[in-house]
Amino acid sequence: MRPYGWPRAARSRCSRRSQEGEPHSMSSSDQQYPPYGDPAYGEAAYADPAHGYQDPRVAQTWEGQTWDTSYQPAVRPGPQAPPAPQQPDAAATAYLPVQGAAPGQGAYPLPPEVPYDPPTTTLRAVPPEPAPAAAGEPAYSAPVTVGNARITDAQRARAEGRSPIIEPGMQPAALTALLGGLMAGGAALGTYGLLVPLVLLQAVTAAGWFRLNGMWPARQGIALAFAGGLTADVALLAAGREHAPAAILGTLGVWVLLVVVLQLRSHAGAEERMYGLMATVASAALAIVATGHLAAAPDAVIVGALAVAAAVLARALPLPGAASLVVALLAAAGAGVAAGGMTGIGAPGALLGLGAGVCALAGHRAASYDYPSRFVHMTAGVALPLALAAPAVYLLGRALV
């Protein structure tokens, strides 16, 4: 191995001669270099400008990794500091707000500082909840339920925390009295004169009961219940008053079976089908039971219809609960006495009127339950007092007349 720094031209000539088989001999140009082993051997070769080499210590600097610990690379100057930023022209930045200006100065003042709570590790006391209102004091404020003309009675009662029982009021009571007067006048005219207001009563009963149970629209159920009432009327007219119980109860049994079959064919859920079954059966039963007015004696129908009208009107008066109930029963008995005197029943008309009044108040109470709407009051609140009074009118009429 030849030492580092041996001239490239000499190496190429030696290698070419060794390949040609010639003995190695140095030319005159090669002989000018010091012999091998001399420390100045490589320096002379690099210093020879004829070979194109220069002293690496003068012209070259190795910056890579080297094993020579005596070599020290040349020190390069450090990075120059960045030039100082130029100040912008005052005319070009005139529209910008002045930094640090007092409030009210500059084009765009800085927003005010928002105060915040300093961080803390202690627990804060929670204010206690307000105590509930004492017994007898309202638990609502006046602005919540007063001054809103669009709020319904049911919504107002729910917001005020009152009872879900809401009476129909004077207007449905007046309609009940009007319908009772029509039935009394129709009974005085005859059987077919009573049939017209009775059919109207059955239609309103079917619609009002479904709405009272929260099922609306329920056209099929209403039509089925109303059809049951019409069927009972036709069966009673065909069989006669002497066979009235068989006609009414037979129609009721057939209609219950029909309702069950139709509900079994429904694709609704089990719970919904049960609700529909109970509502349809009850509505159909009320419409069919109302046929009892047609089966009763005409004088009993007159007394009972007028007693129901008097009881409902007295119940709608602004009186306390117990006093209103007593006044309504007394009004029904008095109307029975008055109507009995006109029809020839006499004093027993008071008992007939009292019985019809009790049934009417039960129907009135049913139409007032569970936050009823205005539609419920104008349907169930009108029809249920007269529909529930039909059994009392028929039974007491057969016993007293």
Image (cartoon, grey):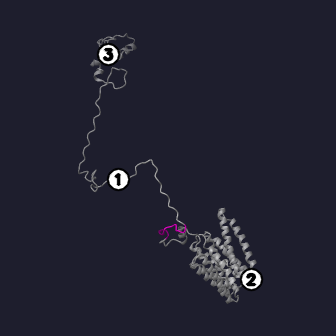
Judging from the image, what secondary structure is the residue with disc 1 in? loop
Question: Which residue type carries mark 1?
Answer: Glu
Q: Which residue is mark 2?
A: 399
The image quadrant where one finds the N terminus is top left
Residue 42's disc number: 3
Question: Which residue type carries mark 3?
Answer: Gly
Quarter of the rendering containing residue 65: top left
Specify the segment rendered in magenta. 135-145
Q: Which residue is mark 1?
A: 113
Residue at 63%, 71% in the rendered image: 210
Q: Is residue 210 above or below residue 91?
A: below
Q: Could you tell which of marks 1 and 2 lies nearer the N-terminus?
A: 1
Q: Was residue 141 drawn as part of the magenta stretch in this picture?
A: yes
Q: Position of residue 377 (x, y in %)?
A: 59, 75
The image quadrant where one finds the C terminus is bottom right
Q: Was residue 289 drawn as part of the magenta stretch in this picture?
A: no
Q: Could you tell which of marks 2 and 3 lies nearer the N-terminus?
A: 3
Label 3 – label 1 distance at C-alpha = 79 Å
Q: Nearer the viewer, residue 4 or 379?
A: 379
Judging from the image, what secondary structure is the residue with disc 2 in? helix
> In the visual, does 183 lie left or right of 107?
right
The reply to whether residue 102 is visible in this rendering is yes
Q: Is residue 157 above or below residue 344?
A: above
> In the visual, does 186 lie left or right of 5?
right
